[in-house]
Image (cartoon, rainbow, N blue to C red):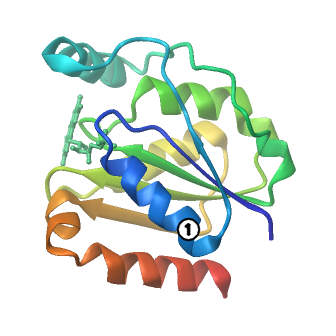
Amino acid sequence: MKTLVIFYSRTGRTKSIAKILSEKLNCDFEEIIDKKKRSGLKGFMRGGLAARKGELTEIKPLVKNPDNYDVLLIGTPNWGSKIPPAIRTFLVENKNKLKKVAFFCTQGGEGDGTEVFDLMSNICEKNPINSLKLTTKMINDGSHHEKIAVFINQLEN
Ligand SMILES: Cc1cc2nc3c(=O)[nH]c(=O)nc-3n(C[C@H](O)[C@H](O)[C@H](O)COP(=O)(O)O)c2cc1C
């Protein structure tokens, strides 16, 4: 099964999980880059608002073609139980190229997170074969490794 790990990350946390996943699955890895600057306090505030309003953005052209993969693992940070414009844009622009999808999400707090996956699923019109939600606490205390192992095991079987 040809797999691509593809993600958006504003501050690197989702990226660190994407790296672990692609290393463990020995598969390709692609970062979705928002052409709009999202750093700093302004980026946080405007990004949150854009996510809430369901705005699209311009993303850099992808290096890998999603069409060439059997499964895409799509990673996003949770932005107020919504998704960043870059992930929304990727899903809208590529939904016809996606075969199987799995989702992963990082978030600061303990909130539910299922809203994020439901949103992604609605936009790309596919039910994920699996999903993984990780909090900052899990990443800091190392318990994310066990969750990642279970997630990968379920994907492979
Ligand atoms: C605009 C914005 C809104 C956020 N909203 C939430 C939230 O509602 N709940 C939460 O737990 N974390 C929230 N966070 C925190 C991020 O989900 C968390 O820090 C995530 O791991 C960041 O991933 P990244 O480093 O890949 O960008 C928010 C962050 C941003 C920038």
- Residue 39 is situated, as x and y percent measured from the top left of the image, at 26, 20
Q: To which quarter of the image does residue 125 belong?
A: top right
- Residue 27 is situated, as x and y percent measured from the top left of the image, at 68, 63
Mark 1 lies on residue = 23
Q: To which quarter of the image does residue 46 belong?
A: top left
Q: Residue at the location (13% across, 17% down)?
A: 41
Q: Residue at the location (39% across, 35% down)?
A: 83
Q: Can residue 115 be seen in this view?
A: no
Side (left or right) of 80 relative to 123: left
Q: In this view, does 28 lie above or below 78?
A: below
Q: In this view, does 28 lie above or below 156?
A: above
- Residue 113 is situated, as x and y percent measured from the top left of the image, at 30, 54
Image-quarter location of ligand 1: top left
Disc 1 crowd rating (10 Å Cα; few below 14, some 14-19, many 20+) is few
Side (left or right) of 13 relative to 74: left
Q: Can residue 31 be seen in this view?
A: yes
Q: Which of the image's four quarters has the C terminus?
A: bottom right
Q: Residue at the location (51% across, 14% down)?
A: 57
Side (left or right) of 52 relative to 157: left
Q: Residue at the location (42% across, 75% down)?
A: 148
Total numbered circles: 1
- Residue 110 is situated, as x and y percent measured from the top left of the image, at 15, 60
